[in-house]
Each structure stands twice: as C-alpha cells, then as structure tokens.
C-alpha cells in the first residue's frame, strides 16, 4: 500500500511539474474566495463531504507533502464549479458522481464512502475507475486536485502557497489580487463592452 501511494505521489509531482507553465483555466467567486478553510470544511454535507473524502484519499498528506485539505482542494473545486462560466454539464457530472460513488459503496460494503476504511475506499475507487464514466470522473477529480496544488492562492487553492513550496516552484510576478482574478476580469470586460456598444 505504501509503495502504491508513493508511485501515485510521484506521478502527481511529474504531471504538476510538466504542466506548471501551462495557463490554468481558473475562475473564482468572491464569496468563496474570502472564506477561511475551517468554514469550508466545517459541517460538510453531501455532495461536498464525499468529494472531500475522495480528494483526501487520492491526495493524502504525509510527512513531507501536503494533502488535499492542506491545499484547500475542496474550496478550489467549489470556486471552479460555482463560477458563472463553469461548464454546466461538467458540474452536473461531478456532483452526480457522488451518487454513483455512494451507491457502489453501499452495494460493496453496506456503508457510505465516508465510513469506509482506506482499503475499502481504494477498492470502490478502483471499481469506479473500471467504467468509462467512472474513469472520467476520477480524471476530473485529479485535474482539479492538481490545479488546486499549483494555482495562485487567490483562486482558493494552494493555501499558504503550500503546493508551490512542496514543488519548489517560484511563481511569476506580480501575482493577481482578488480584483484581478479571471472571473472578475471577465465581468469587467463584459461591462465595458456593453458600455461601448451603447455609445
């Protein structure tokens, strides 16, 4: 089991380093951007509770590296799915995946996913990975985890720049402020376009 986790972590490091220079499709909402992590994780209910549990299983913390909660992966995902230009079908698919996850967990273990031990979780996720839709769902989960790891903290992930520190990444300068996040720039651009059209 330990070797499997190390290989997964090494894979994530390689993918992250290879893609660190690519532009991220990252959007954020101000109402979520400013939240403290303890508010995001406190009193979670489904689908977010199950998603947070999957994220922690896929990207667990260890002695040398941050885990999903350490990098605010859930808050990042919530920001991305809540943005006005988020893909509605992708959001629906991500949230519907929680129902499939818990249905399979109940049929295999008579317990919801959050109640399973680590080995049981791994078996459920491996079973999900075996289907086309399940493989796509897990791939999206990993994509959002990697983006949370390497994104600018202003987008809600990479809390305290832990992802950058772990990867020894030096970001470009200057980094955006909350007013300069992609989501706000789109709104500003649309507002100016409407103003010019009326003139």
Image: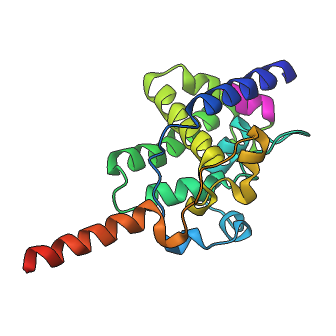
Residue 90 vs residue 86, the one in the foreground: 86
Residue visible at 32% across and 69% down in the picture: 187
Question: Measured along the vertical axis of the image, is residue 12 above or below residue 111?
Answer: above
Report the span colored magenta: 118-123
Residue visible at 32% across and 72% down in the picture: 188
Q: Please indicate whether residue 61 sits to the left or right of residue 81 in the image.
A: right
Q: Which residue sits furthest right? A: 63
Question: How is the rendered protein coloured?
Answer: rainbow
Residue visible at 82% across and 40% down in the picture: 65
Q: Please indicate whether residue 187 sits to the left or right of residue 35 in the image.
A: left
Question: Measured along the vertical axis of the image, is residue 109 above or below residue 8?
Answer: below
Residue 190 lies in the magenta stretch: no
The quadrant of the picture occupied by the N terminus is top right
Q: Quadrant of residue 173?
A: bottom right
Q: Quadrant of residue 149?
A: top right
Residue 145 in percent (x, y) is at 61, 42
Residue 109 vs residue 52, the one in the foreground: 52
Which secondary structure type mostly characterizes the magenta part of the structure?
helix
Residue 120 in percent (x, y) is at 75, 30
Q: Quadrant of residue 191?
A: bottom left
Residue 71 in percent (x, y) is at 71, 52
Question: Measured along the vertical axis of the image, is residue 57 above or below residue 133?
Answer: below
Whether residue 136 is visible here, answered yes or no, is yes
Residue visible at 47% across and 45% down in the picture: 94
């Amino acid at each position: 089991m330990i070797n499997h986790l190390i290989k997964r972590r090494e894979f994530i490091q390689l993918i992250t380093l290879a893609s660190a220079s690519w532009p991220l499709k990252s959007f954020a909402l101000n109402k979520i951007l400013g939240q403290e992590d303890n508010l995001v994780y406190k009193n979670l209910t489904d689908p977010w509770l199950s998603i947070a549990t999957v994220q922690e299983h896929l990207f667990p913390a260890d002695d040398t590296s941050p885990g999903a909660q350490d990098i605010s992966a859930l808050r990042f995902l919530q920001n991305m799915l809540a943005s006005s230009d988020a893909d509605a079908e992708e959001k629906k698919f991500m949230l519907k995946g929680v129902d499939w996850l818990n249905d399979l967990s109940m049929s295999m273990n008579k317990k919801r996913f959050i109640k399973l031990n680590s080995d049981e979780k791994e078996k459920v996720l491996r079973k999900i990975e075996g289907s086309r839709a399940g493989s796509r769902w897990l791939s999206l989960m990993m994509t959002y985890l990697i983006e949370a790891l390497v994104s600018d903290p202003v987008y809600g992930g990479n809390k305290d720049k832990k992802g950058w520190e772990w990867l020894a990444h030096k970001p470009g300068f200057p980094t955006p402020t909350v007013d300069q996040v992609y989501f706000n720039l789109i709104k500003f651009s649309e507002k100016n376009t409407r103003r010019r059209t009326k003139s």
